[in-house]
Image (cartoon, grey):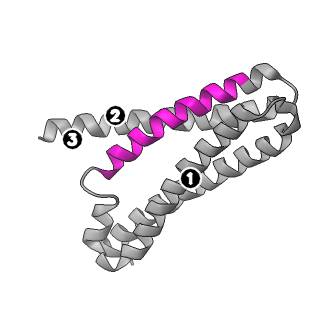
Amino acid sequence: MARNSHIGNNTLIDISALEYILLGDLLDLLEEADGDVGAWKWISEVLDTLLKTMPREFELQDQGGYMEEVLEEHPNWQAQVKNLYEERCELLVKLKELQIRMQAARPLKKIADELRHDLRDWISSYIAHQRHERRLVQDAFNNDIGTAD
């Protein structure tokens, strides 16, 4: 059982690293995407990959329960954890909607600026969500350990 947990943890680390790279690539591509059809093709590829890897990442994070370690330490944080979980689900749905909107746009030039803005906003929201998750975990265990004098 411990071996499977180790394998799952390594997979989660790999997926998280890939996601980090893809988000950076997406930001770079959005800078180049002004009138470049090729850049939009790559943006589409990055979105496809994110939409394939993020559900797997979430599945791995949820093994044993989403933020279960936080709730074990602080059961009264249930509302915060629930809000983060719902936000994470909404972010995935929003990314899929952006992908669909991009694929449906003909010609893409009509909505390129708006789509570029919306994708940047999504990236900012997703990064903020990840920070909030990390902060909640850190707070849970820092509260438990206490601060140094």
| Left-right relation of 19 to 112 | left
Q: Which amino acid type is shown beneath numbered disc 3?
A: Ser
Q: Is residue 121 above or below residue 40?
A: below
User: Could you say which is closer to the camera, residue 20 or residue 111?
Assistant: 111
Of circles 1 and 2, which is in front?
1
- Give the image location of residue 143, x and y in percent: 36, 75
Dot 1 lies on which element?
Answer: helix
Count of labels in the image: 3
* Residue at x 11%, y 41% (from the top left corner): 1
Residue bearing the label numbered 2: 11
- Residue range (magenta): 41-62
Name the main secondary structure of what is drawn in magenta.
helix
**Which badge, 3 or 2, is on the more N-terminal residue?**
3
Dot 3 lies on which element?
Answer: helix
Instruction: Give yes or no for residue 97 being in the magenta stretch.
Output: no
Label drawn at residue 5: 3
Residue bearing the label numbered 1: 91
